[in-house]
Image (cartoon, helix red, strand yellow):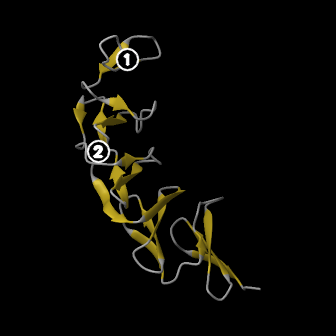
Amino acid sequence: VRDILGDVHVIGVDGSEQAALPGGATPVYLDIFCDDVIVLEAGGKQCLYSLGQMNFLTYYIYDEILPFDRSCAIMRQGTLYGLLSADGAESLPATYPYLNALGEGVYTARGLSMGAELIDEQGRKVYALDTYVGGLNDLRCGMTWYGTLTGDVAFLNSTGTFVKVVPGV
């Protein structure tokens, strides 16, 4: 809720004030992530803020912080994307021109080469492709797929383990 002075307050379900946010800050989302973290914006930049500790977890240095998927959020600095954990640490610095949340804590990273990589919430490479043709957009029933130059379709699970390769047409 914004008061008549322009300050923003977090209100609980019972209508009582839970926290007053720092002056000049505007919440980006009406969600509290990981039971404590909100995304704030000021001066065109975004940061993470802890409601429980009433302090900033990051500086206002991010151009964009997307909603959290489990314990991480995709962030953008300039034209590069990385991952922020709920404690404000960069589990993956802004490195990739393309980063997409597949689900289940797995992300597709592309743009540094002709290939693609699956990255986990800790920023570790789970799987890498030399050449990316298509796919790796989301996880459904714990699996994702990608195409190959030979027209095959390969299926992977969320840990990067091959499940099946279906020959091309």
Q: Quadrant of residue 111?
A: bottom left
Which residue is pictured at 46% across the width and 11% down the height? 14
Q: In which quarter of the image is residue 151?
A: bottom right
Figure quadrant of the C terminus: bottom right
Which residue is pictured at 36% across the width and 56% down the height? 83
Mark 2–mark 1 distance (CA, rounded to whole Å): 26 Å
Residue type highlighted by circle 2: Asp
Of 79 and 143, nearer the camera is: 79
Q: Residue 87 carries which label?
A: 2
- Residue 115 x/y as whole percent: 48, 79
Q: Circle 1 is placed at which residue position?
A: 2
- Residue 15 x/y as whole percent: 44, 11
Q: Which mark is residue 38?
A: none
* Neighbourhood count class around disc 2 (C-alpha, 10 Å): few under 14, some 14–19, many 20 upward: some
* Secondary-structure class at tag 1: loop
Q: Is residue 118 left or right of residue 64?
A: right
- Residue 155 x/y as whole percent: 63, 73
Disc number lying in front (2 or 1)? 1
Q: Sequence order check: which comes first, mark 2 or mark 1? A: 1
Figure quadrant of the N terminus: top left
- Residue 96 x/y as whole percent: 38, 66
